[in-house]
């Protein structure tokens, strides 16, 4: 049984919700337990009773009551030397607030039961002055390309708000089977997660839907180059749904090459890598400190770079998105 503690809110924690602050400092305390402590007035901010969603200000004091049988806070273990060297090689841009990485295909962003190596675990190698870079968005394991991570808690909050508020403009590159008609346009097709019978078992998939649980999904697209049975497609997700680009490409009849899950046999092209050909090429977003829009890009890599060389596609191509594309 520990005694009463008083902790000051740090500068980079300003604007953070109290429940999220507690989760960061005392991860063993469940949300329900925190709510109970708040109702009883055992957890206070600047001497007053507050709610879990209270936004903190730098310098405020938080009263923390005795917490029974609470293990010491666990800090993420630093990555091994190989991981440390690997994650540093992924950096394409860095300043005092953010780091931009070029995530390799096949590298998971976060860990899981069967996932031992992941980007989040490798970020400890970039820790500086006690600040460990934080994830603010995700990419699927099989998708490569640009990822932005925050170097401070405050930057993470502002970037997180930008992603949630759809204030981030992303451009993906994809190799698709066939060529969509028209050559550029907008796909407005709601999608939903459904349990489907696949083979002898059930599997959750994202599918086009018009049911009550369907979510709005909009994607802008344009053909950059064509080469026989395939096309180099630029895609801009207006909404950010899980597997949205893959489902929308398949719905157009032009599945992303290597996407057997949504494209089936049509996604297999002879002589081309069977891996998923989807890459986050660039992002435009408000800088977390200045608020000014900035654009970052990642160079094409891995099997997609080899495919681009094979078809002699321009690896430095630029997608121009007309403002009236969705009008």
Image (cartoon, grey):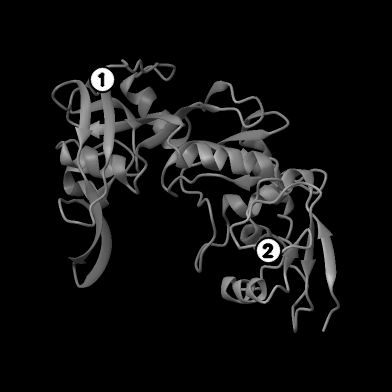
Q: Is residue 147 above or below residue 81?
A: above
Which of the two discs, 2 and 1, labels the residue nearer the N terminus?
A: 2
Q: In which quarter of the image is the N terminus?
A: bottom right
Question: Where does label 2 land, which residue?
Answer: 22
| Viewer-nearest residue: 269 or 258 | 258
Residue 309 relative to residue 128: left or right:
left
| Viewer-nearest residue: 168 or 21 | 21
Q: Do the residues labelled 2 and 1 touch (CB within 8 Å)?
A: no
Q: What element carries label 2?
A: helix
Q: Distance between the residues labelled 2 and 1?
A: 45 Å
Which residue is pictured at 50% across the width and 26% down the height? 299
Asked whether the viewer can see residue 51, the reply is yes
Which residue is pictured at 32% across the width and 47% down the height? 243
Q: Is mark 1 on a helix, strand or loop?
A: loop
Q: Which residue lies furthest to the front in this view?
A: 48
* Residue 300: image location, x then y, percent: 46, 28
Q: Is residue 19 above or below residue 297?
A: below
Residue 104, label in figure: none
Residue 297 relative to residue 223: left or right:
right
* Residue 61: image location, x then y, percent: 81, 57
Q: Is residue 191 above or below residue 269?
A: below
Label 1, residues with CA under 10 Å away: few <14, some 14-19, many ≥20: few
Label 2, residues with CA under 10 Å away: few <14, some 14-19, many ≥20: some
| Viewer-nearest residue: 227 or 279 | 279
Residue 11 relative to residue 307: left or right:
right
Question: Where does label 1 land, which residue?
Answer: 325
* Closer to viewer: mark 2 or mark 1: 2
């Amino acid at each position: 049984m520990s005694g009463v503690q008083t902790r000051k809110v740090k500068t980079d924690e300003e604007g953070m919700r109290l429940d999220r602050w507690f989760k960061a400092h005392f991860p063993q305390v469940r949300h329900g337990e925190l709510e109970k402590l708040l109702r009883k007035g055992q957890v206070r901010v600047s001497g007053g009773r507050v709610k879990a969603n209270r936004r903190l200000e730098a310098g405020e004091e938080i009263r923390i009551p005795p917490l029974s049988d609470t293990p010491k806070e666990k800090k993420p273990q630093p990555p091994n030397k190989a991981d440390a060297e690997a994650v540093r090689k992924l950096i394409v841009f860095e300043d005092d607030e953010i780091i931009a990485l070029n995530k390799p295909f096949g590298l998971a962003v976060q860990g899981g039961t069967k996932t031992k190596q992941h980007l989040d675990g490798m970020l400890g190698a970039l820790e500086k002055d006690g600040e460990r870079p934080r994830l603010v968005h995700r990419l699927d394991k099989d998708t490569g390309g640009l990822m932005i991570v925050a170097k401070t808690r405050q930057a993470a909050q502002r970037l997180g708000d930008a992603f949630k508020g759809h204030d981030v403009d992303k451009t993906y590159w994809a190799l698709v089977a066939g060529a969509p008609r028209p050559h550029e346009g907008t796909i407005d097709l709601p999608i939903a997660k459904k349990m489907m019978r696949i083979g002898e078992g059930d599997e959750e998939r994202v599918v086009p839907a018009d049911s009550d649980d369907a979510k709005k999904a909009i994607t802008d697209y344009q053909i950059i180059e064509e080469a026989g049975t395939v096309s180099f497609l630029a895609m801009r997700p207006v909404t950010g749904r899980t597997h949205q680009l893959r489902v929308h490409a398949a719905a157009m009849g032009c599945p992303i090459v290597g996407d057997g899950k949504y494209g089936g046999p049509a996604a297999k092209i002879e002589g081309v890598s069977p891996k998923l050909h989807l890459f986050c090429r660039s992002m435009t977003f408000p800088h977390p400190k200045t608020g000014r829009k900035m654009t970052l890009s990642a160079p094409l890599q891995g099997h997609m770079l080899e495919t681009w060389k094979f078809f002699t596609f321009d690896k430095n191509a630029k997608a121009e998105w007309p403002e009236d594309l969705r009008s």
